[in-house]
Amino acid sequence: MPLKVLLPFALGTHQPEKKPFKTVYLLHNGIDDYASIEEIARKMNLAVVIPFCQHAFFVDMEASGLMYSQFIGRELVAFTRKLFPLSCRREDTVLAGISMGGFGALHNGLKHYAVFGHTIALSSALVVRGIIESATDGKLGGLNQSFFETVFGDLSLLHKSDKTPEVLAKKILENSDCPLDFYLACGYNDLLVHENRKFSMYLKSIGFPHSYEEGPGSHEWHFWDNFLRRGLERLFLPQKQKLSFPC
């Protein structure tokens, strides 16, 4: 799987430091402009690792043998830590994602909670509830059904599968002693905002520790840029200290 790795000292400002870098693993949504991500990495002194994986929701697709979740949570982290000066500490390791990558961040942040100390999920493509309802009603047909079966497996079993975020969240909450930190955000005008609200309400109902925010914007990079920065600031900057970025 192709990767893009951004290191602060390679971006022209910082010299290599003795201590390893805090790291953000960013699951993208077809990003082709990295300028603002490079700015975040440089100003916040973070390494950013971006794996390229189209249309897979970053779950293990057993039928095809494409084990994306296993790759994200195990192989990718181990490989990049060996190759680059990245921190091995859980609290220094962030999994972030946008849209389909937001779903992937939730799924893998839950599944690999012992690896990722923080999860940031923006405009998450929380489509599982709709898939289950449509498959049950017989309204999910043709290409969509074939695609979702390839990704999620038997759709009749999806409601109890760990590929359903609600199922995985409840399971982790019952079995994990690790501190959990999840930050979710979605734009007011995003078509996915209702599902993101519902998911946040579900997490609140079971006592799952998370923060949820909404703000101006739709399914667009301007919103993601702002809220990726907000999500990282709450982790790595002292309270009240904010970075200034060009509009």
Image (tube, rainbow, N blue to C red):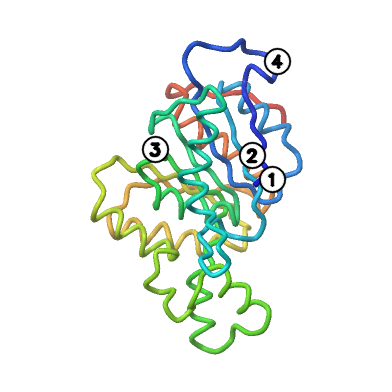
Residue type at mark 2 is: Asp
Which of the two discs, 2 and 4, sits closer to the camera?
4
Q: Residue reaching furthest front?
A: 65
Question: Do the numbered discs 2 and 1 sit on residues whose CB atoms are within 8 Å?
Answer: yes
Task: Determine whether the residue tagged by mark 3 lies in a helix, strand or loop.
Answer: loop
Tag shown at residue 117: 3
Q: Which mark is residue 12?
A: 4
- Mark 3 touches mark 2? (CB < 8 Å): no
Tag shown at residue 221: 1
The answer to whether residue 161 is above or below residue 132 is above
Considering depth in this image, is 64 or 151 the residue closer to the camera? 64
Residue drawn at the location 55% of the way across and 49% of the way down: 122
* Residue 225 image label: 2
Q: Residue 201 appears at what percent x and percent y?
A: 38, 60
Mark closest to the chain's N terminus, 1 or 3: 3
CA distance separating discs 2 and 4: 21 Å
207 displayed left or right of 26: left
Quick one: label 2 or label 4, which is nearer the N terminus?
Answer: 4
* Amino acid at pointer 1: Trp
Name the residue at 51% across, 69% down: 152
Spatial CA distance of label 3 from label 2 is 21 Å
Q: Is residue 182 above or below residue 138?
A: above
Q: Residue at x 62, y 58 (%)?
A: 190
Q: Residues within 10 Å of mark 1 (few under 14, many from 20)?
A: some
What separation in Å lies between label 4 and label 1 (alpha carbons)?
Answer: 24 Å
- The quadrant holding residue 5 is top right
Amino acid type, label 4: Gly
Q: CA distance from mark 1 to mark 3?
A: 25 Å
Q: Secondary structure at mark 2?
A: helix
Question: Mark 4 and mark 2 in contact (Cβ < 8 Å)?
Answer: no
* Foreground of the two, 70 or 104: 70
